[in-house]
Amino acid sequence: MFDTLSDRLAATFKNLRGKGRLSEADIDATTREIRIALLEADVALPVVRAFIKQVKERALGSEVSGALNPAQQIVKIVNEELIAILGGETRRVKFAKNGPTVIMLAGLQGAGKTTLAGKLGHWLKKQKHTPLLVACDLQRPNAVNQLQVVAERAGVAFYGPQPGNGVGDPVQVARDSIEYAKQKQYDVVIVDTAGRLGIDAELMQQAADIRAAVNPDEVLFVVDAMIGQDAVTTAQAFLDGVDFTGVVLSKLDGDARGGAALSVAHVTGRQIMFASNGEKVDDFDAFHPDRMASRILGMGDVLSLIEKAEQTFSQAEAEKIASKLQGGGKDFTLDDFLAQLEQVRKMGSISKLLGMLPGMGQIREQINNIDDKDVDRVGAIIKSMTPAERTDPKIINGSRRLRIAKGSGVQVGEVNNLVERFFDARKMMSAMASGKGIPGMPGIPGMGGGSKKSAKKAPVAKGKRKSGNPLKRAQEEAAAAERRALGAGQGPAQDGGAFGLGAGKGPADFELPKEFKDLL
């Protein structure tokens, strides 16, 4: 959603690189570009003004002028101010001292409240809670049935005594659900309320009545991240009518300009607590302002990646694989390789995982073109092998490869590629695990690496010896002086020396060819 904003900010900061000192004109130009980038991303105008004012004040102060690298200092300031606009610190759910904790969801129709109730329930279940989903949307057709299906998918309990479709009292259902939760010992009650296509008095009155009946510990305003500037207006209306305590962003995986979502926390003074970024029940997590700011600025989100890995990978399995690689990698089989692939697939989409790594914004198109089915295809090839072939892939000859290709529905070339890549990967991983670094790469401090041959000291070049004969030495010095004079004047050096520098060009005004500049 924030790809366009990320690209614009990256291009702005790129213009600052290499400048040892920033003038006031440089800072004005940079803040102007940031302002345009934010407005194009649909961020609310009051928010943009406050943001630019703060960035400019800090950029013109001693914080930047006294810095060793002013460009990096500007990026740091923008990052910190972006975190502040997104709410500052991560906001946690406030649980009741004496249960059950009541969480009420409010928002317009189509914002994704019902689906989000299931995702929130699933997330709380992973946190060792026992949530109960309550159907208080009795107006929308089949809303009760939808919540029941969502609850089943999420693996959480459901309470819906009324059939809905315009029948039943939502306030009474909400009130009864608290007693039901106490009897069945559910520690969290999630109340799904009705929405409307727009703000109206009936909607606000019903939401206010439900709030008064259940006295919720948290009222979460669910906002569609794709609705644009109307998100700010709607948020303000719900704040006045229901007084919500936190915001939940839904549909963050869309490609619309999501700047309005960035504005909600600043305009209402209520922090974003959760974000939903996909259709699956697992595509939901707590909102971390610092991590979102890092993603927008193209710095990645390594902490979220680590958290996903910790939830998916078992410590025992990781240690087992590490010990196999430490022993030279010969014990690392295709079965182990398949197990690792399946663990990675459990973490989610490969393109989303790669997008969390720093610097991956530069190759975003290539990442978006990654097909997760390729990983499934690799799994099918490995599963078409016999146990002996998986343990020792060296025995896979031509006839075996043909059989494996037919069994997995691929071409023989794909089987060949997989086997070759497996051997290369095993060699590289075992080298890294043993501290030798990556084969064929220069040694990295603390990582080893490089070949043994390269460790030998290069012979010290000897300078040209001067003659011991005073007459001969004087002749040599005269010849050297003549060559220097020719190099500075109209002599042969004008056509370019051995390096093609051209006449009168020394190291001070030498420029690299364009290809090398692009590479650097």
Image (cartoon, helix red, strand yellow):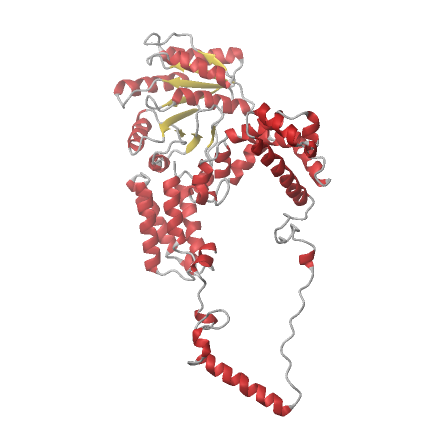
Place residue 459 in its image quadrant: bottom right
Q: Residue at x 68, y 48 (%)?
A: 436
505 with respect to 456 (left or right): left
Q: Nearer the viewer, residue 196 or 416?
A: 416
400 with respect to 344 (left or right): right
Place residue 385 in its image quadrant: top right
Q: Residue furthest right?
A: 327
Q: Could you say where residue 69 lies in the image, as x and y percent from the top left?
A: 46, 58
Q: Nearer the viewer, residue 338 or 1?
A: 338
- Picture quarter with the N terminus: top left
Q: Could you say where residue 449 lies in the image, as x and y percent from the top left?
A: 65, 51
Q: Residue at x 45, y 11 (%)?
A: 159
Residue 156 visible in the picture: yes
Q: Could you say where residue 20 lies in the image, as x and y percent from the top left?
A: 43, 62
Q: Residue at x 60, y 38 (%)?
A: 421
Q: Could you say where residue 377 lies in the image, as x and y percent from the top left?
A: 55, 28
Q: Residue furthest left?
A: 200
Q: Nearer the viewer, residue 410 or 274?
A: 410
Please, is residue 170 above or below residue 506 in the view?
above
Numbered label tally: 0
Place residue 468 in its image quadrant: bottom right
Residue 97 visible in the picture: no
Please, is residue 435 above or below residue 66 in the view?
above
